[in-house]
Image (cartoon, rainbow, N blue to C red):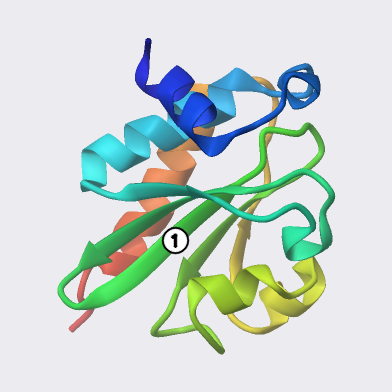
Amino acid sequence: MTGCQTVIYESGISDSEHLQIDWIRLYNLVNLRDAYDGVIYRSKPGSLGNAPPYFVVVIERAGETYAVAETPAEGNATYLVAEKMAAGSWLEMLELTKRDARNSGDRRLIHSGSNGSAHLKKINNALTDLITVKP
């Protein structure tokens, strides 16, 4: 079983939900988890005001917590939470609507086209900007 399949299996996602999955988005999360030594969680349905669940990679760096929230459903953006810049924890931010989350410090990264590697690079660049200490 691949890393992505393991994440799906362990999350308890139903067979009917499998039909809606953009697998590239989930492979990207597995890549992020592995690259940043993070942990993947599945949100409850309705997170960020959305019906499909989000999958969240949580990353700890220098005492700070960062989260990348992605739903595999088309038409949804990736959300990046840096707890030090947000109005709450990543769990609290997922309870908000998308608009309220953006207004409270979440960063939205919109998928452009079907190139998964370009979006993964966008996420990595955004994480690097947040994690890098600025003088």
Q: How far across and down, in percent of the image, does residue 92 sit?
A: 59, 78
In the rendered structure, the answer to whether residue 69 lies left or right of residue 32 reads right
Callout 1 secondary element: strand
Q: Residue at x 78, y 17 (%)?
A: 19
Q: Quadrant of residue 52?
A: top right
Q: Residue at x 84, y 49 (%)?
A: 51
Q: Hey, which residue is sitting farthest bottom in the picture?
A: 87
Q: Residue at x 24, y 47 (%)?
A: 36
Front residue (pair 36, 51): 51
Report the number of numbered marks.
1
In the rendered structure, the answer to whether residue 134 lies left or right of residue 53 reads left
Q: Hey, which residue is sitting farthest top in the picture?
A: 1
Amino acid on which the number 1 mark rests in the picture: Ala
> Alpha-carbon neighbours of circle 1 within 10 Å: few (<14), some, or many (≥20)?
many
Q: How far across and down, in percent of the image, does residue 5 sit?
A: 47, 18
**Measured along the vertical axis of the image, is residue 67 above or below residue 118?**
below
- Residue 115 visible in the snapshot: no
Q: Quadrant of the C terminus?
A: bottom left
Q: How far across and down, in percent of the image, does residue 105 sit?
A: 58, 79
**Measured along the vertical axis of the image, is residue 118 above or below residue 127?**
above
- Residue 120 visible in the snapshot: yes
In the rendered structure, the answer to whether residue 68 lies left or right of residue 135 reads right
Q: Quadrant of the N terminus?
A: top left
Q: Residue at x 42, y 56 (%)?
A: 126
**Measured along the vertical axis of the image, is residue 59 above or below residue 70?**
below
Q: Quadrant of residue 133?
A: bottom left
Residue named by callout 1: 67
Q: How far across and down, in percent of the image, does residue 2 sit?
A: 37, 13
